[in-house]
Amino acid sequence: MKQEDDFVVCRCENVYYSELLNIMENGANNSRELKLKSRAGMGFCASRTCGPLLERLTGDQHEDSPGYIHLKSQPPIRTISMKELSGEGDT
C-alpha cells in the first residue's frame, strides 16, 4: 500500500521506498540482496541512479570486507546493426 509520503527510488523498475523498507524488514541485510529481491537497480541505468541510496539504506557504502560485493554500474548499451557488426559499412 503506497503512502502519501512514499516516493519512487528506482525509476527504471518503478520501485517505491516503502517496498524497499518492507523487503528489509523481511530479512534483506545488504544492498545486493535488496537489489535482487526488489529489482531496484536492474533497469536501464544499471543502478547509477538508485544504487547509492540502496547502499546507504543498508549501510553498505563503506563496507570493505571481502565477502561484500559493491553494486556496480555499467554504461548503457546501444543497439548495433548486423551490418555494423560485420564491418560492411566501414569501406
Image (cartoon, grey):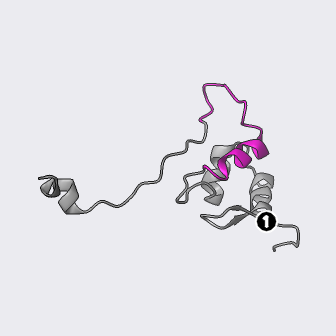
Instruction: Give whichever of 35, 4 is nearer the camera.
Output: 4
- Give the left or right position of residue 22, taking residue 88 as reference: right
Taking the magenta stretch, the answer to whether it contains residue 22 is: no
**Which residue corresponds to the image point at 72% horizontal and 35% vertical from the top-left?**
61
Taking the magenta stretch, the answer to whether it contains residue 60 is: yes
**Which residue corresponds to the image point at 25% horizontal and 63% vertical from the top-left?**
81
50 vs 61: above or below: below
Mark 1: few/some/many CA within 10 Å (<14, 14-19, 20+): some
User: Main SS type for the magenta part?
Assistant: loop
- Give the left or right position of residue 58, taking residue 36 as reference: right
Instruction: Give whichever of 65, 72 is nearer the camera.
Output: 72
Q: How many marks?
A: 1
Q: Position of residue 85 (x, y in %)?
A: 21, 55
Q: Position of residue 41 (x, y in %)?
A: 60, 54
Badge 1 element = loop
Type of amino acid under label 1: Phe
- Give the left or right position of residue 10, taking residue 89 as reference: right
Give the farthest residue toward the top: 65
**Which residue corresponds to the image point at 73% horizontal and 48% vertical from the top-left?**
53
Circle 1 sits on which residue? 7
Where are the magenta residues, as a range? 48-69
Instruction: Give whichever of 81, 69 is nearer the camera.
Output: 81
Image quadrant in which you'd find residue 64: top right
